[in-house]
Amino acid sequence: MSVRFNSISVLCASLCLAVSTLSFAADPASAAVPAAKAPMTPASTVANKPAAVNANYTALLQKITQGKVQILKQFTGPGDLVGLLVRSPEGQKGVVYVDKNAQYVIIGNVIMADGSSRSADDTDKYVNSEIAQKAWGNAAKTAWVLDGSPKAKHVMYAIGDPNCSACHRFYSDTRPYVNSGDLAIRWIWVGFMRPTSPGMAMAIISAKDPGVLMKQNEQSFNEQTEAGAVKPLANPSPELKAKFDANMKFMAAHQFTVTPTLIFQDAQGKAHTVLGAVPEPGLKDLVNQAGGAQ
């Protein structure tokens, strides 16, 4: 199962703001074009110690981004390209490519001959796995509310907005798994889609029985207007506001930009993150892949 963030687009936008020209080529005669298909290096052959970053690649990226982007690692790219793990001015990590002669930089998707995205594969490998593991470890510290049995075999976190139609679909689609006791969802409620979202999220977080309020929100959800049915909490206490703010900071700190974002750990202890609602039959596979509680 492939699990990916949108780190490529986020990083691309960030780096585009860091440069003073629309061209990423150091030499006007050179052009960034999709690389020819090359076999991906198996994980087992990757050296334990990353290769030192070539000074020419550092100089190229520093020149293009005016010194605003940091190179964290160099790795083997497709064809004649070299991959670089970089950090943007805003702190996001991502993958870019340079040619071996340090003449140009490719920011964005590198598409292989079979139609697959090498950029996405390398982003999964060098960025997403680290973020997912950190997110799984930090999710337990949020103000999550339980949906399902605490003894469920499969457990996952879901970041949701009460006015999110995709969250509504995910909630509805997971009822068979939750009601059977097979799946427990720990909802991390946030609010940004509508002015009413923060108050609605805090109403759910502070409810005596959050499950009842979540059910009310979803059963009466208006899909045409994309509006939940929970009445926003008008005057939250400072303590409740702090819990909600912590949920929002959790979402931002791990570069999650859409709801629902699903976070789980498999039986082998590897954390995964999935963006968006997952329909059947993929949902069943997703549930079965999730392990128990941390």
Image: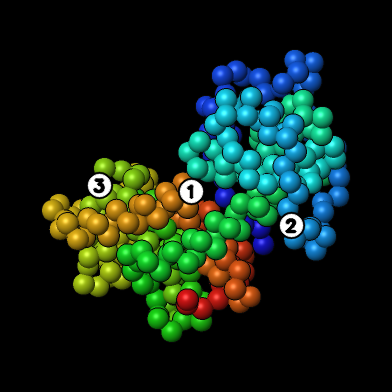
- Find out whether the residues at labels 1 and 2 contact each other: C-beta distance under 8 Å: no
Q: Tag 1's secondary structure?
A: loop
- Residue type at the position of mark 1: Gln
Few, some or many residues within 10 Å of mark 2 (<14, 14–19, 20+): few
- Residue type at the position of mark 2: Lys
Q: Which sits in the foreground, 100 or 5?
A: 100
Q: Residue at x 61, y 77 (%)?
A: 267
* 1 vs 2, front mark: 2
Q: Tag 3's secondary structure?
A: loop
Which residue occupies the extreme bottom position in the image? Answer: 151
* Residue topped by disc 1: 255
Which residue occupies the extreme left position in the image? Answer: 235
Spatial separation of the CA atoms under disc 3 and disc 1 = 23 Å
| Between discs 1 and 2, the one toward the N terminus | 2
Spatial separation of the CA atoms under disc 3 and disc 2 = 50 Å
Q: Residue at x 28, y 56 (%)?
A: 244
| Between discs 3 and 2, the one toward the N terminus | 2
Residue 196 image label: 3
* Residue topped by disc 2: 49
